[in-house]
Amino acid sequence: MPFAIDGVLLSNLLSTEYHLVVALVKECDMEELTLDQIPRKTRDLYEKAMAALERGNTGYALDMLKQVITVEPRFLLARKNLRIAQVKLAVAAKPNAMTHQLSSLKGAFTLMAAQGKLKKDPKAALDGAEKLLAMDPLNLSFLKFFAQAAEAAEMTELAVQTLEIARPYYTRNVDFLRLLAKLYIDTNQPGGAKDCYAAVVELRPNDQQAIKNLKDAAALDTMKAGNWTDMKSDFRSKLKDQKEAIRLEQQAKSVKGESDIDALIEDRLRDIQREPQNMNFRRALADLYVRAERFDEALQALADATEAAGRSDPQIERTVSQIKARQFDNAIAAAKAANDEAAVAAQEAAKAQFLYDDAVEMVKRYPNDLQFRYELGYQYYLRDQFNEAIEEFQLAQRNPQRRTRALYYLALCFTAKGQYDIAFEQLQKAASELTLMDDTKKDVVYEMGVLAEKMGRAQEATGYFKEIYAVDIKYRDIAQRIEAAYQKK
């Protein structure tokens, strides 16, 4: 039976603090390059490789992707697409134990040579590991060494990415699951570690070490869910002292009532008076004001932070936008509670207008911020301004974190314009880059089915719907669509 945790004790949370700090430090070491950050020549080569993949010219695409990662080893999107293509080819050949034994023999000398370079020249070892995976991307020995080499080269996130792509092939391999779980912990992704350890416990329900690992991962995940570790997207990226950050978050998490929040607010005000240039204290103050729903004071605290920093900060401005949106939400909730439908409609319209105006303004201020481009594209999409939305999403797809969603909305825009073939191409790109049937892939595959129906390819459409039905019978109207398909038969 699957192992379940009803709750996580505070003592468990505190016992993981050391591991959390280590994970944060390791995560900081990883400097992933995005498409916008690589040289134009290399970007052109990458885009040609992706075009070749879409045309089915896989061998040519693989050669170009290898050239890209040789020039820019930290451009993880290129490595991801290289690995996905390699794995697809390997799976199509229907590998088995004998396949992996033969590849191990073939790659023995390459492996030994790369192992000898692991300490003195990690990059050369990583290059050797790439050669091994080119021989057999699903060989467990090669995958383990690749993870070692990536960690030695301070590119642990690369190891995670590679093992995630191989995971569907190793769903019941305990050694593989333990390795991936460890890498998830090292890169501050405790939710992934928790899933891996839960799978191990399901396979080995009496394994006490696996049970302990699962509890520890759950504790870390609880901490992260409480925003203890949001380094990349919020003020954590500017924290100089991780212990101070954890102390501030522990205090915030321990709040039980208004008096506790008020006391912490007074503490932060004193901290700011003592260290006016410390952004930790100013952002923590704004967060406490938001918790107390003192939004105007939170906005003022962020304005003061911007003034103290002496420059604008897109992350602060994002937070300001979120607070203002929450003010509208509170006004809408109050109007609903009062059964004032006119006020509800007015506040919802005002919020929609604010979100649109804010997205336009942020792109004007930060034209190179692809996240703002994505948000503006979404606002255009909501207003049926499809050409404008397409322009923004075409830019936003260069952001690896937003690429698949941008492709999804591009498809919706082209569909709305009746350009079904172009829409379908965008969905195919997105689907090829998604290895797990998560919410995003469900949305993408569903729209592929809808488009296939619109283009008169009913059998193909049913195939797409079946992919979702097999993993989530409650998704949208998928159950009704499958039942209707079988009734036609």
Image: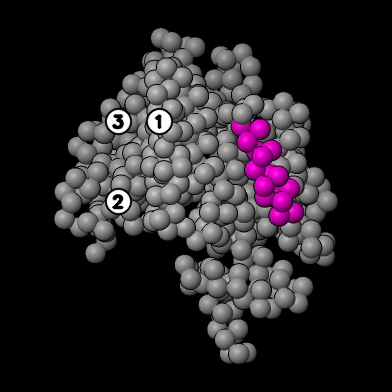
Residue at image x 68%, y 57%?
A: 427
Q: Which residue is mark 3?
A: 19
Question: Which numbered circle lies on residue 112?
Answer: 1
Mark 1: secondary structure: helix
Q: Quadrant of the N terminus?
A: bottom left
Q: Earlier in the sequence, mark 3 or mark 1?
A: 3
The answer to whether residue 214 is left or right of residue 208 is: right
C-alpha span from label 2 to label 3: 22 Å
Q: How many marks?
A: 3
The x, y position of residue 260, in whole percent, is 31, 32
252, above or below 86, in the image = above
The x, y position of residue 59, in whole percent, is 67, 47
Given the image, on which type of amino acid does mark 2 rest?
Answer: Val
* Residue sitting nearer the eye, 90 or 473: 90
Q: Quadrant of the C terminus?
A: bottom right
Label 3: how many Cα within 10 Å (few below 14, some 14–19, many 20+): some
Residue at image x 61%, y 29%?
A: 70
379, above or below 255, in the image = below
Residue at image x 47%, y 11%?
A: 276
Q: Nearer the viewer, mark 1 or mark 2?
A: 1
Give the residues drawn in magenta, as a range: 52-69
The answer to whether residue 340 is left or right of residue 274 is: right
Given the image, on which type of amino acid does mark 1 rest?
Answer: Met
Q: Is residue 115 magenta?
A: no
